[in-house]
Each structure stands twice: as C-alpha cells, then as structure tokens.
Image (spheres, rainbow, N blue to C red):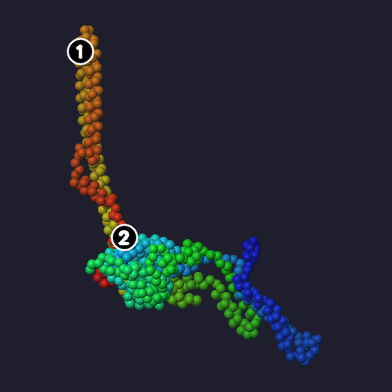
Amino acid sequence: MTALLSDITQLHFLRPWWLLALPLLPLLAWRAQARMRQRSAWRNAVDAHLLPHLLAPAELHGRQARWTHRMGLLGLLLSVLALAGPSVRKDVQPLWQARQPLVLVLDLSRAVLAHDLPPNRLAQARTKLASLLQERAGGQAGLVVYADDAFTVAPLTEDAANVALFLDALAPEVMPADGHRADRAIALSQRLLRQAGFDRGEILLLTDRADGDAIAQATRARAAGYSVSVLGLGSGQGGVFSAPEGLQQARLDAPSLHRLAAAGGGRYRQITTGDADLRALEVLDPQQEDAAAARGETSARWRDDGYWLLPLVLLLCLPLFRRGGAFAALLVCALWLPLSPVQAQTQHADAHGGSLWQRPDQIAYARMQEGIAAYRRKEYQQAIARFSQQHDADGQYNLGNALAQAGYLDAAVAAYDRALKLQPGMADALYNKRLLEAAKKRKEQQNQQQNQQQSQQQSQQQSQQQSQQQSQQQNQQQNQQQNQQQNQQQNQQQNQQQNQQQNQQQNQAGKPQDAQAQQQANDAQRQRMQQALQKRQAGQRERERPGHPDAPPETAEQRERRLANQAWLQRVPDDPGALLRARFQLEAQRRRGGGL
C-alpha cells in the first residue's frame, strides 16, 4: 500500500499538452445527445408527452444508445490520458556513447626520418599519438601503419593503453618494403571499421603528401560513411633523410593533403607542438555525455505507462461495432498480443523458420549484434553462445575469434575451417587460422622445453643427492681418522703422564721444585696439541665447501648441468619492434601468396 501511494504521488504526464483536449469531451457529449433527440421522425408528428407511451421499444433502444455513447466518451477520455503519457516510475538505462571510432594511420616510409621537425618527424608523430590516446575519452581506437603496403598494429579497442604499447617500436625498419601507398592504408582502415560493425567512423592520417590513388580511396571511404582527416607531418622547407639511394629531401605537400581531407569529408591541420591541431580536428575533446558513457555511467528516465490504458480503450469501443462482434473480439486479442514480451518469443524462435514477429534474417542479425556486443565487453562465453547459432561464414569467423580469445585454440581453428569451407579465400579467417597454428606450435615447443627442464632438474637433484651421499661418506671417513688420531694422542698423553708420575715418585724426596716445573710444561704442551687439532679440523671443513680452491674438481657432467641452469634462469628481453617486423613480413608473404 505504501508503494502504491508513493507511485501515485510521483504521477506526472510526459506530454501534458494532450490534456487540453479534455474540455472538448463535454461538448462532444452534448452534441451526441442532441443528435439522438433529432433522430426520431415521430418527434415532429407526436407530442412529446405521448412519445414514451407510443415508443416503448424505441425507449429501450435509446437507453442502449446512451450507454454506447457514454462508453465511447469514456474511451476517448482514457485515450487522451494515454496520449498525455502518464508516468510513475523511472527506468535505469546506460548512456549511449555517440563518439565514433577512430583509426590512426601513420606513414612509416623513410621520409618520416626527415629532420625538419626536431629531432625528426617520427618522434613528433609518436608523441602526438601518445598524447591523443592518453587524453581521448570514449570511443574505440585502432592503429594502422603503411609504407609500400598497409598493416594493422592494433585493432579497434576501447583500451587505449593497448594501442599505445607499440608506439615506441614503430620505425621504418619494421616495414617489409619502403613506399608510400596511403590508398591501401585508407582501404585497410575502412575494412577494420566495417568488420567491427561500425557504419560510421573516423580515419586520421599522419603523412606529408597524398597522390591521386589516395584521394580516390578517400572519396570511396566517405561514400561508405567514414570520414578521412589529415595531420600534416613536416614543414614547407623540408628536411633531409637517409635512403639506400643516398640522401633524400622530403617536403610537406599541404595542397595535396587539403584535397585528400576534402575528398574524405574531414579536416586538415599541420602538426604543432601543442594540442591545438588535435582540437581543431575534433578528435580529442569528447562531449560530456560521451565521457560519461565511457566511464560506464547510467541515467534514469521516466517510463511511459500510457500503453496500459489501451486495452481498456479497445474494450470500451467494442459496442460501437454494429456488426461483426466476434471479429471485434478477435481484433482486441490480436492487438493485446504485442503488449506481451516479444523478446522471449524471439529468443526461442528458430532462426531458419522465423517467428511471429521477425523474419529469419532479422533474428540472425539480432543474434549477431548480441554476440558482437558481448565480444566487445570481453564476455567471450556469451559471445560464443550467440555466434554458435550463426551458420554462415561470418558467424563462424566471429565464433573462431571468440573461441581464440577464450583460450580454445583447437575449437577456434575448427571454426575458421568451417568459415573457409563456406567462403573459400576469406583472408581474415586464413590469417587468424595461421596465427593460431603458429601459437599452438610455440606452445608445444614451450611444453617440450619445460619437460626438458624438468628432466634436467630431476637429474640435477639426483646428482646433488649422490654428491651429498659421497660427502657424507667422506665425512664419516674423516671422522674415523680423526677418532683414531685422538685415540693415539690420548694414549701418548697417558704414557707421558705415567712416566711423569714415576719420575715424580723417584725425585719426590730430593727435588720438589723440579717436579712442579715439569708439570707446568706438560700442561702447556697438551693445550698446544688441542689447538692444533682444532685448526686442522676447521681447515678440512673449509676445503670441503663448494667453490673453494682446494675443493674437489668439478666433473664435465656437473659443469654442463650448472651452465644449463644458468642459461635457463636468464630472461630474454622483450623486443616489440622485432615482433612487428616478423608479423608484417609474414603478412606480406601471405598477400603475395608466397607462404604463411
């Protein structure tokens, strides 16, 4: 009861202007009553006080008509209230992130090493990209580099730190061949946006010049819904850079870059030391709602509850039908069905046969979008469940990606095989399949190395146990020798004591002073012997320690195991540049059809 009262106190109308139609209802009621009085032709021929006695059946018909009109007026009243949008509660909804995805495209031809921008263009471009990725809030970002061909460094992701991870490794040395094919970079960026499910997006190109092919490709990208903006690298005076042919000169061709940005529907700015260029390109400052959506914030909106009045309106309108009452009842039931949750029917509908409310292609598209949304949220199990219901080539390709992210490499390879069977020559499926196969080989090699290391460790433990046993045996032998020496020394001391006692007895009567001196000398000798014995034992233990110069010599097998352990403990430093170079070379070979 308390909850009901609280809901009533919060009642308000989302479209209150419809309430202005309420004063018209009494006018309609008066008009309907007047028309009912004028319908009877007997009113003109018979006095009014005689009509109730002459028209008894008509009176009953008049009462039915009055009730019909009253119900119609009540239906109109409820319709006006429903149109006004009554609301008593709020629904929590996530904020819509309107920021478009951004693909960053960097020119890695040798001209990027020109020194007209200190220290060079490449360093300035890295700094600019790092600043953009750090300060940009909301929206997905990706990174593409190009020279003679274009390659993906980082796909579209909401984690800007993942994109910035490879900035320090970007250099012309990682590219398989030198060149300047900006058209291929724009085409690759457009393909990345389309594969990620974006119908709109931005492409930001960092370069110093553009040719006709690049301008034509920018025009095609704009027609597809993707804008192309340009950030000019370099200066009008130009700079010198080293090439295999010798020293070359590179200048900023601003007019061609202006034409490229105009063809792509974007903007052009020359690179500066601050962030004014990025703000002018409108790729840096997010809107307030976009930033809140990027942080995962939600908003509470009033819910329109007026649709609950529609069933009552339909019921009140039933008496208005003069004929076909059964048809009207069926019509009410048909109109009531859309008010029930359709989502449950859609979820359990057969994708091949469709449902009452959706075609099969609409159901398949909805499931595909649900899987893509789950994949972007990194909920890979849910994405796998959605993509498993897609039996076309794109669905199996997406299923392979989700399985690979979840760690099921064998199942992912099988999904890529099914996608290739449905669509032979799918480049992305081939590339991802080969990457997974290479990863599986590396994993198997790592397992073999781990097994070898474990066997080496076991052999080392066994050798250590053997060496410990040998050292224990040596210690036992040394202890036996020491015990024998101590017994001999004790026997000698006892003999000396007996001799001293005999001499004392012989000389006791005549020389008492000489006996005392002899006793002191014997005590001092015994102390010196004990000290020498203790020093000898300490030196023996010191020589038995590992690494001592006088320790037993190390065998070849022991030395080999020790070096293997040292090599195993060492860590190989990461080299992102070498990783990118190897990946780009493999991709170039695959595109030429010359291997993986």
Binning the other alpha carbons within 10 Å of mark 2 as few (below 14), some (14 to 19) or many (20 upward) gives: some
Front-lying residue, 147 or 232: 232
Q: Position of residue 355 (x, y in %)?
A: 48, 75
Q: Amino acid at mark 2?
A: Pro
In the picture, measured across the screen, residue 65 lies left or right of residue 474, that is right
- Mark in front: 1 vs 2: 2
Front-lying residue, 131 or 307: 131
The residue where tag 1 is placed is: 503
Q: Position of residue 222 (x, y in %)?
A: 40, 76
Quarter-of-image position of residue 588? bottom left
In the picture, measured across the screen, residue 497 lies left or right of residue 134, that is left
> Looking at the image, which residue is at 24% across and 13% down?
516
> Looking at the image, which residue is at 22% across and 12% down?
514
Quarter-of-image position of residue 202? bottom left
In the picture, measured across the screen, residue 8 lies left or right of residue 274, that is right
- SS assignment at label 1: helix
Q: Is residue 55 above or below residue 240?
A: below
Q: Is residue 144 above or below residue 504?
A: below
- SS assignment at label 2: helix
The residue where tag 2 is placed is: 576
- Sequence-earlier tag: 1 or 2: 1
> Looking at the image, which residue is at 20% across and 27% down?
485
Q: Which mark is residue 495?
A: none
Q: Position of residue 430 (x, y in %)?
A: 31, 70
> Looking at the image, which residue is at 70% across and 83% down?
32
Q: Residue furthest front?
A: 237
Q: Amino acid at mark 1?
A: Asn
Asked if labels 2 and 1 touch by Cβ distance under 8 angstroms, the answer is no
Residue 417, can we see it?
no
Quadrant including the C terminus: bottom left
Q: Position of residue 28 (x, y in %)?
A: 69, 81
Residue 31, can we see it?
yes
